[in-house]
Amino acid sequence: MSSASLPTSVYKLIKLWSRLPGVGEKTARRMVFFLLKQDPEWVAEFIRTVKQVKDDTHHCSECGNITDIEPCSICRDKMRNRKIMCVVESDEDCISIEQAGIFNGLYHVLGGQVSPLDEQDIPEESIEKLKERVVDLKIEEIILATAPRIEGDLTAFAIQEALKSIPVKISRLSYGLPVGGSIGYADRVTLHMAMESRKEMQ
């Protein structure tokens, strides 16, 4: 189906939808045509919810996780172990570990990774915030939950280097995560094994 045979608004929505991760143009087209078949009230609710998510969510000023309250529910939970901190690359990784129910400490979301080929780096303010939190909260162990690929290795080493002057144990997720995989797509059992068999970084 060529763009000339589609209404301009439909073609534009397909193009926008195809920019989503893992969504090609054919999948985007199916989604748009599904949307066109739905009840107007459902479509209106869908649109309102997308706008609400964008308007009402932000990153927690403490840990950097996505939230609609300040600080986030994890940071304000007094029942959590406040002496251990899991450092992740993205808020998606944080949610994956949290939903797996394998960790009851605090988190720190870096908001980036070290990837020279993509010219990406960890935001300097995130590293400074991490150092500040480790000292202020008297954190005893940092668990680096970075992806098991070269970017994750570089990110883990960068954090280890940044914290070298602070007396804190640093370990990293270990057995169970496939090389080249992603924290965000790992299942609960895999994450649990990786968390339980974490190894201290030397």
Image (tube, grey):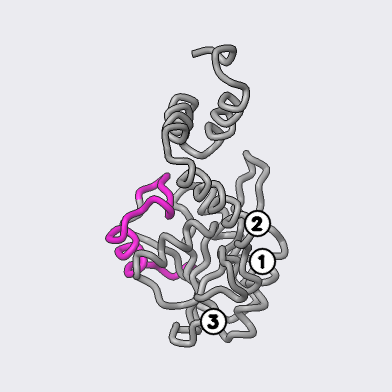
Q: In this image, 46 relative to 125: left or right?
A: left
Q: Residue 86: x, y in percent?
A: 49, 70
Residue at the image point whose x is 57% and y is 56% from the top: 53
SS at badge 1: helix
Q: Is residue 136 above or below residue 182?
A: below
Q: Name the amino acid type tagged 1.
A: Ile
Q: State the mark number for residue 174.
A: none
- Magenta-tinted stretch: 178-202
Q: Which numbered mark, 3 or 1, is in the foreground of this view?
A: 3
Q: Are marks 3 and 2 in contact (CB under 8 Å)?
A: no
Q: Which residue is mark 3?
A: 76
Q: State the mark number for residue 122.
A: 2
Q: Name the amino acid type tagged 2.
A: Ile
SS at badge 3: loop
- Residue 198 shown in magenta: yes
Q: Which residue is mark 1?
A: 127
